[in-house]
Image (cartoon, helix red, strand yellow):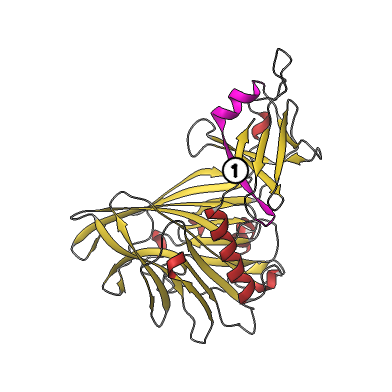
Amino acid sequence: MERLKVYSLLPLVVAAVACGGGEQPKAIVITNPLDAERHELVAVPYGEFTAAFGADSLFRVVNAESGAEIPYQLETKGTPSPQNILLYVSVPASGDITLAVEGSAPAPVAAGTFARYVPERYDDFAWENDVVAFRMYGKALEGRPDDAQGIDLWSKRTTDLVVDKWYAHGDYHTDHGEGMDYYSVGMTLGAGDIAPLVGKEVVYSKHYRGHNVLDNGPLRTTFQLDYEPWQVGGKTVSVSKRYTLDVGSQLNRVEVTYTVDGDGELPVAIGVSRRAQAGQLLHEGNNGMFGYWEPTDDKHGTTGVGVVLADGPSEQLIEQPTQYLTVLTAHDGEPIVYYNGGAWDRAGKITSANDWFAYLRTVKNRLASPLQVEIK
């Protein structure tokens, strides 16, 4: 199965050339408005890029000052042609970088994100990046004693991609040095899935019915899961969920669109599995953030799970015996955008509740103050 698409070998309409008439060649300037160094993907619209830098079959992007090459991916969003050029950049606190585009072959970019349908394991759909992995349960699991509902979180302590390897050996509930799946989902929303509410009760759908991978690395993976209609409090409801996972990120970007008959409004909840022992909570409803640092498992360590809303506050937090629910209202045809994911202390990067809650706040701050990209 193909994981790495070497876009630089395709006949792209892009290259860096000096402008005629003695003008200076154009450059990409990326500015960081926050007082903290950032390492993340930025998107440059493909049409703007080609208009600025001419035409050729090969190109590479470099830091104009240091000469260091910048990894990139052409993002198609499921269309036949590129929509954006994704650049993985490091930008200093309250500073900027200038990127030049050269008409030569780029270095290969190792696959750092991946997703696939897993028919050999009850129609799972699994995805990962270099720091975390997830799966959603499929149709073939319905009705079985081991059926479960929400998003499953796999704990990794390697930057290697492991989905294919772990499914091949089947023993992913044991840590063989790369991590494991010890997260318990059961009949909850797991690590940040979403579902309608009637009163304070979750009305689960059946498992997803359709899947479509729109981009599959090396720096960003995006896919869509679609669900058949079901009844919620006398209304017919259906939903489509689009997940985007970038290299280096502990969180997915989730775009959820409900179709709702009747008045077109629907109470929904984003849920996180709750453990029997006490954990540590971060709940800032007005800021659209919820974090849970689970009680430590003596055998397996500690997992943090979190949810960050892209826009607006959550309406309330409902504490149930098996899960925490962050409540908001869905409107017919209007996307809800939020971020969900987790971290494992044994990966060595985020090792405490303070670390995890600080990470969630950092994500929120970055959403409020994105990197600014200009072609000059």
**Residue 357: percent from the left, percent from the top?**
58, 71
Q: Examine the image and state in which quarter residue 157 appears.
A: bottom right
Outermost residue toward the top? 21
Q: Examine the image and state in which quarter residue 87 appears.
A: top right
The quarter of the picture where the C terminus appears is top right
> What is the secondary structure assignment of the residue under circle 1?
strand
Check the image and report above or below for 224 versus 200. above
Q: Is residue 280 visible?
A: yes
Q: Examine the image and state in which quarter residue 230 appears.
A: bottom left
The quarter of the picture where the N terminus appears is top right
Crowding around mark 1 (Cα neighbors within 10 Å: few <14, some 14 to 19, many 20+) is few
**Residue 223: percent from the left, percent from the top?**
48, 48
**Residue 330: percent from the left, percent from the top?**
32, 58
**Residue hosting label 1:** 372
Q: What stretch is highlighted in magenta?
A: 35-56
At 39% from the left and 59% from the top, the residue drawn is 139
**Residue 39: percent from the left, percent from the top?**
67, 52
At 70% from the left and 29% from the top, the residue drawn is 59
Give whichever of 71, 16 is nearer the camera. Answer: 16
Q: Can residue 172 be seen in this view?
A: no
Q: Does the magenta stretch include residue 151?
A: no
- Amino acid beneath label 1: Gln
At 42% from the left and 75% from the top, the residue drawn is 324
